[in-house]
Image (cartoon, rainbow, N blue to C red):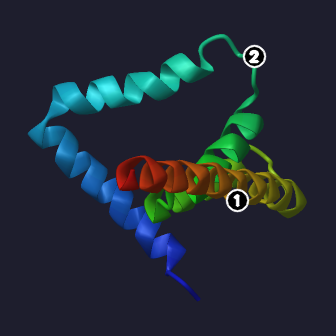
Amino acid sequence: MFSNWPDLVSTIKQSFGALSKSNPKMVKAYMALGEAAAENNVLDAKTRELISLAVAVTTRCDGCLGTHAQAAIAAGATREEVAAALATAISLNAGAAYIYSMHALEAYDALKS
């Protein structure tokens, strides 16, 4: 197992509370981002959580993976839906690596001249 996910999510939630006591204005603003994203109800909670899981993969955030996996389960996402969202993240991240490889070669060529 890569991580003890229940313990990780619990630790994150406890730590989140501690951080909010230290900087409540910042945490309030952070929480407002999620509320704003859900405001128009164009995407349901399950879709937002599937997107969040895919983004968490591309940003390599274990805490995001744990908390959004838990939220996806609560929103009714199936394992198959999660796997499909992750397949999309894999295909995009490979594409991003290809694009940035072209950037790296361009930088090399430009700097070598």
Residue linked to disc 2: 42
Q: In which quarter of the image is residue 8?
A: bottom left
| Depth order, front residue of 73/3 | 3
Is residue 12 found left or right of 105 in the rendered image? left
Furthest toward the left, the residue is 22
Q: Earlier in the sequence, mark 2 or mark 1?
A: 2
- Which residue is drawn at the image coordinates 64% and 49% (left, top)? 99
| Depth order, front residue of 10/39 | 39
Is residue 19 found left or right of 40 in the rendered image? left
Is residue 61 found left or right of 54 in the rendered image? left
Q: What amino acid type is highlighted by mark number 1?
A: Ala
- Which residue is drawn at the image coordinates 43% and 46% (left, top)? 110
Residue 107 visible, this orientation: yes
Q: Which of marks 2 and 1 is in front?
A: 1
Label 1 CA crowd tier, 10 Å (few <14, some 14–19, many 20+) = few
Which SS class for mark 1? Answer: helix
Residue linked to disc 1: 94
Q: What amino acid type is highlighted by mark number 2?
A: Val
Where in the figure is residue 33, as x and y percent of width and height?
A: 44, 24
Furthest toward the right, the residue is 80
Which SS class for mark 2? Answer: loop
